[in-house]
Amino acid sequence: MLIGNEGDTLRLIKTVLFSALIFHVLCTGSPPVARSQEPINNTRLWVFKSQRELWLIKGGKVKKVYHISLGRNSKGPKLHKGDNRTPEGEYFISEKKINTPFHRFLALSYPNITDADQALERRLIAPKQWADIWFALQINQTPPANTPLGGRIGIHGQGALDHQTQRILDDIDWTKGCIAITNAEIEELYRLIPLGTPVKIWK
């Protein structure tokens, strides 16, 4: 728990951030789109790490189950940059990219505020870094990746590999923390998933 000067600093930062958010609304003329518990277009993604499965859910029904590969160190939630773990918790699709080394890329809103709060408690990040993450999430942007928590975590394909190598990757955890499916599957998911889609990742 933050006490003394650090607690005062964080309270001040939260006050300043709230003012900045109000300023953002006044300048743009509209508030950020709220992320409610209701999935966008009745669509959400559930990821079960222990089962190596990604479920595409529409209208409360499982429409498709994808086999996935995870970070090379697959046990436990992501704690810091370079631990090769896949995060656990609630996120949303914050960005979509076409031309990437791993074909299509659906960015996750990692780190979320829970990740940031825990990192601040452990003194892994500074209050200013916590504030940068908080503000990005309030305006539905991808949080910064240049903190000790790391970033650039998402769902992607296997990239430009030969067929035999792709089949090998199907059966192992090989990413640096992302969730990987085949190139054909990420193309399909890319078309079906809008920005803001909720993603829940279980251990």
Image (cartoon, rainbow, N blue to C red):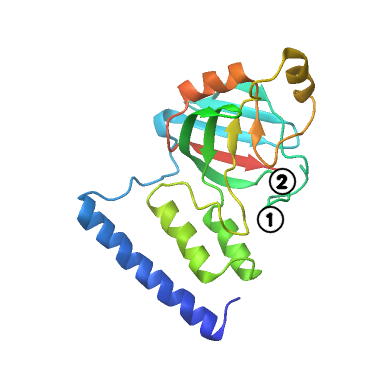
> Counting other residues with Cα less than 10 Å from the Cα at mark 2, is it few (<14), some (14-19), or many (20 or more)?
many
Q: As drawn, is 196 to the left or to the right of 78?
A: left
Is 105 situated above or below 6?
A: above
Is 89 situated above or below 127?
A: above
Residue 67: quadrant of the picture: top right
Q: Amino acid at mark 1?
A: Leu
Is 164 situated above or below 82?
A: above
Q: Amino acid at mark 2?
A: Arg
Residue to which mark 2 is pinned: 85
> 124 or 198: nearer the eye?
124
Q: Residue furthest top?
A: 163
Residue at mark 1 to residue at mark 2: CA–CA distance: 8 Å
Task: Tell me what residue is drawn at x 42 percent, y 47 percent.
Answer: 141
Could you say which disc has been placed on residue 47 in the image?
none
Residue to which mark 1 is pinned: 79
Labelled pair 1, 2 in contact (Cβ < 8 Å): yes
Task: Tell me what residue is drawn at x 63 percent, y 29 percent.
Answer: 54
Q: Return the x and y of residue 6 as percentages of the image width and height.
A: 53, 80
Q: As drawn, is 144 to the left or to the right of 162?
A: left
Q: Return the x and y of residue 104 as percentages of the image width and height.
A: 54, 26
Q: Residue furthest bottom?
A: 4
> Counting other residues with Cα less than 10 Å from the Cα at mark 1, is it few (<14), some (14-19), or many (20 or more)?
many
